[in-house]
Image: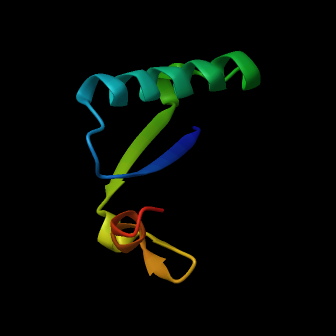
Amino acid sequence: MPYVNIRVTRESVTREQKAELIQGVTNLLVDVLGKDPGTTVVVIDEVHTDNWGIAGESVTVRRQRGH
């Protein structure tokens, strides 16, 4: 049973885009590894930019500075 966890920052990812990610990742595992789509689990975690850090600072701060 494949388990795939996708983490993205919580910023305007639509329900439709999430559905596309879930279907696309499932199809990829079927096509590449021959996995059963009925037992393939895909989880999307949305993380607030205050809780996502790069180079010692939050994404929120980096974006405020134009990075």
The front one of 38 and 20 is 20
Instruction: Give the quadrant of residue 64.
Output: bottom left
Instruction: Provide residue 54's location: percent of width, then percent of height.
Output: 53, 72
Quadrant occupied by the N terminus: top right
Picture coordinates of residue 14 (x, y %)?
A: 26, 31
Give the camera-side residue of 60 and 23. Answer: 60
Residue placed farthest to the right in the image? 32
Residue 1 vs 8, above or below: the answer is above
Residue drawn at (26%, 40%) of the image: 12
Q: Is residue 3 above or below residue 52?
A: above
In the picture, measured across the screen, residue 8 lies left or right of residue 37, that is left
Q: Which residue is more in the foreground, 12 or 23?
A: 12
**Whether residue 3 is situated above or below residue 47 in the rendered picture:** above
Where does the image place residue 43, in percent across and percent down from the top left? 41, 43
Q: Residue 58 in the image: x percent, y percent?
A: 40, 75
**Would you say 49 lies left or right of 30 here?**
left
Q: Indicate whether 28 appears above or below 54.
A: above
Q: Residue furthest front?
A: 66
| Picture residue at 42% right of the left edge, 62% below the top | 66
Q: Residue 16 sits in which quadrant?
A: top left
Find residue 13 and report its image quarter: top left
| Residue at x 64% of width, y 26% of height | 29
